[in-house]
Image: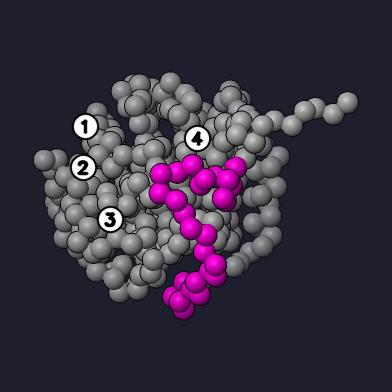
Amino acid sequence: MSEPLAPKNRVVTGEKMRGADKVARIPVKVIPTTEMPRKPDWIRVKVQQPGEIERIKDTLRAQKLHTVCEEAACPNLPECFGHGTATFMIMGDICTRRCPFCDVAHGRPWPLDPEEPQRLAETVAALKLSYVVITSVDRDDLLDGGSSHFSACVRALRERSAHLQIEVLVPDYRGRLQAALDAMHDGLPDVFNHNIETVPRLYAAVRPGSDYTHSLQLLRAFKERYPGIPTKCGLMLGLGEEEAEVLAVMHDLRAHGVELLTMGQYLQPSKQHLPVSRFVHPDEFQRYADVGSAMGFHHVAAGPMVRSSYHAGEQLQQARSQTAGSTHTQPLK
């Protein structure tokens, strides 16, 4: 006798919701796009070294690991995988949030896998990486938002690869800030990254369940507790923001101690996701980079194809070189 079907409104552990199912209950409804916009000439995906891409994918599947490169349909996957780099996504591939710009599935996640830190360390060693980015889905079901699991992964990586540089790209830990910061102490990264994504006016539509002020507080709180570790943040453009709003966010980030900034073009993953408001010209990105340098950011990576972890290792090295030869910094206010 077959199992009875679960009610449609019941969330089943491990079941992935995407597209229209994922965004059905967010405050600002997404009207499906009838026809995807044509991308301008300056947005091109580099396809190279297919053999290396398959090698990395095979290694990840064997170790039961996920990358945000795959789960979020990142356009830079061919280039990054082709160069033997990847951004690992821990704590599963199901997110407790329903952000309509993101292609990661929503639902009720499985419990944490205690063996994941060790498998991650083994995989990074096997791939012979020198710089690794660890990110995750949102885990609002956990008391510390998963911060202690991040720390466990960092410790395992350092034990296996002593010279490895580690960047963490963390969720906002909303409602769990103190517990999250406390859990980080035994597994600190080389770079602490949290994406604020967009301007405050668009938060209800772009980041339901998140709060702009709280994200700023997270970045500032980490910098105040661990002043020697660079903090980093990412923005998407092309969602309907105005230039004055972007500049205001940049000022807010500097006032909260952020040193590294990435800015890229939002690209719509599917017709059910938020539409692209406009394609930002490379010249505009360059203006933001120039302004960011004048504000005191140690490094600004800005361009249509830039993503938060794109060329992250190179960005940190450039920032360290600039910091070593310059005193152009700005204190917390």
Magenta stretch: give its range.
17-43
Q: Which residue is mark 3?
A: 299
Mark 4 or 2 closer to N-term? 4
User: Which residue does the image show at 13% across and 47% down from the upper left?
Assistant: 330
Does the stretch in magenta take in 129? no
Of the residues shown, which amino acid type is indicated by label 4?
Thr
Task: Indicate which label's residue lies in the foreground, 1 or 4.
Answer: 4
- Position of the C terminus, as image quadrant, is top left
Of the residues shown, which amino acid type is indicated by label 3?
His
Mark 3 or 2 closer to N-term? 2
Mark 1 or 4 closer to N-term? 4
Q: CA distance from mark 3 to mark 1?
A: 20 Å
Q: Secondary structure at mark 4?
A: loop
Mark 4 or 3 closer to N-term? 4
Of the residues shown, which amino acid type is indicated by label 1?
Glu
Q: Which residue is mark 4?
A: 96
Q: Is residue 305 above or below residue 173?
A: below
Q: CA distance from mark 1 to mark 4?
A: 28 Å
Does the stretch in magenta take in 34? yes
